[in-house]
Amino acid sequence: MIGSIQQDNIVTDIQNAFVDPQMVAKYTEGPPRFVPGYNSMLSMAAILLAERARDDARILVLGAGGGLELKTFAQAQPCWSFDGVDPSAAMLGLARQTLGSLAPRARLHQGYVDDAPEGPFDGATCLLTLHFVDVAERRRIASEIRRRLRPRAPFVVAHLSAPDGDEERPLWLSRYSAFLAFSGVEPEKAAAARNAVTNHLEILTPAQDEAILREAGFSGPSLFYTGFTFRGWVAYA
């Protein structure tokens, strides 16, 4: 019973992190602690976008709340502009705060992928977002992003993704729980977080994630990032 309560509390904390003012204010402290190699993953995403995006590129950022990726991309490419989309008004407010003097280069839209401008965009990202939705919605989101991109434009995506199997997946989830504890999370909360992820999020295998990209019309999905239970790909419209 206690374990169940802890799991429910973790899920509630995840949901509140996007709406509760006090938790939103601390949001930017979270991803670097809870996602292995987070800052390097953002840097790699910027590099992958720049491989094909032009100097004055317009980039779509889905799940832009908090503004961490927007800030990384804006600092890396001084002539890029951005359209950031997120359902949480509070998180978009934090994104403006995070961007600071860079904020005029980003147009922020409250909503979901259907609320994103039509483009066409020179590149797009969706980081740490798709593991919150089911398979059908992932396919639809990927297709909607693909529809808004110029031909051959890069799409960078990263989220929870782990091999299946009675032994392999639990092992990777245990390693992630150990990483949380190593990062300063109390061991009991780290274990509860692992159980919450297992029971409340739909984690696909890497092969399934790549298949969704292909089904949405993207070509050449290529793995560029692995951080225990997190993986990231670049694919092309």
Image (tube, rainbow, N blue to C red):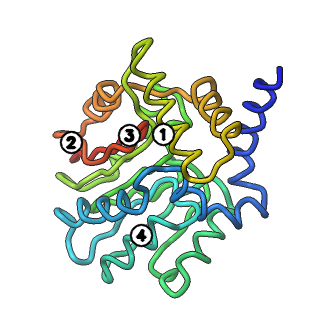
Say which residue appears at 78% left-offset and 63% top-offset.
21
Place of residue 161 in the rendered image (x, y in percent of width and height, measured from the top left): 41, 33
* Residue type for callout 2: Ser
User: How far is the residue under mark 4 from the one under mark 3?
Assistant: 18 Å
**Disc nearest the viewer among 4 and 1:** 1
Could you say which quadrant of the image residue 227 lies in? Answer: top left
Q: Quadrant of the N terminus?
A: top right
Say which residue appears at 29% left-offset and 53% top-offset.
149
Marks 4 & 3, CB-CB < 8 Å contact: no
| Other-residue count near label 3 (Cα within 10 Å), few / some / many at <14 / 14–19 / ≥20 | many
**Which of the marked residues, 3 or 2, is nearer the chain's N terminus?**
3
Give the SS element for disc 3: helix
User: How far is the residue under mark 4 from the one under mark 1?
Assistant: 20 Å
* Residue type for callout 1: Leu
Pick whichever, 31 or 202, lies toward us.
31
Pick whichever, 112 or 225, lies toward us.
225
Q: Which residue lies under the disc numbered 3?
A: 142
**Which of the marked residues, 4 or 3, is nearer the chain's N terminus?**
4
Q: Which residue lies under the disc numbered 4?
A: 82
Q: Which mark is residue 222?
A: 2
Marks 1 & 2, CB-CB < 8 Å contact: no
Left or right placement of residue 1 versus residue 208 in this view: right
Q: Which residue lies under the disc numbered 1?
A: 130
**Which of the marked residues, 1 or 2, is nearer the chain's N terminus?**
1
